[in-house]
Structures are given as C-alpha cells and as structure tokens.
Image (cartoon, grey):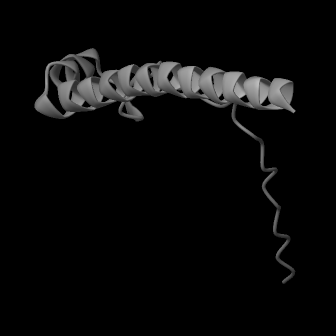
Amino acid sequence: MYHHTKQKKQTKLPALPRPPRADAQICDKQYTKAMELDAHLSSYDHHHRKRLVEMRSMHAERTRGERERREAKNADRELKRLQKQ
C-alpha cells in the first residue's frame, strides 16, 4: 500500500495593488484613508510642526544674512590691514 503523495505546486498569486497612500511630509506620517489625513492636517501636531519648520527657515535666512555681513566686514578689515603694510 503505497501512498503517493502529490506535491502541490506552489503558484505565486499576483500581488494585490497597495491602496494609495497620502502623507503629511512635514510630519513624516502616512495615511491610507483620506479622512485620517484630513483629521491629521487639521490637528495641533501638524500645525505645530509646520510652524516649527517655518520658524527654522526664517531663522536660517536671518543668520545667513548676518553671517554674510560679518564676512564682508572681516574681508574689508583684512584688505585695509594688507594695504597699510
């Protein structure tokens, strides 16, 4: 009594398409449902992070201008010092 066991062929099923994701790039969060994304976009967390990003960019612009003025001032001093010698 021989039992022949058939091995089932394992066939790969085509992958199901992923549902489209919406994300809040500032917060690095992804949502599959539009309602969840809308709720997040109106949340305190999202607005707080958005203000933080805006504040950082404004600060970077201000310090960049200050740094350029300082560098120009130092270059003028160095030029005057070299001309005196």
Instruction: Give residue 71's quadrant in the image.
Output: top right
Instruction: Give residue 69's quadrant in the image.
Output: top right
Which residue occupies the extreme front position in the image?
A: 84
Going by the image, does 80 lie left or right of 44?
A: right
Residue 66 seen:
yes
In the image, what residue occupies the spot 69% across and 21% down?
76
In the image, what residue occupies the spot 46% across and 19% down?
61
Q: Nearer the viewer, residue 60 or 84?
A: 84
In the image, what residue occupies the spot 13% across and 27% down?
43
Q: Quadrant of the N terminus?
A: bottom right
Q: Nearer the viewer, residue 65 or 84?
A: 84
Q: Quadrant of the C terminus?
A: top right
Give percent across and percent down for residue 13.
69, 35
Q: Nearer the viewer, residue 52 or 25?
A: 52
Looking at the image, residue 1 lies above or below residue 47: below
Which residue occupies the extreme bottom position in the image?
A: 1
Q: Nearer the viewer, residue 64 or 66?
A: 66
Give percent across and percent down for residue 7.
82, 61
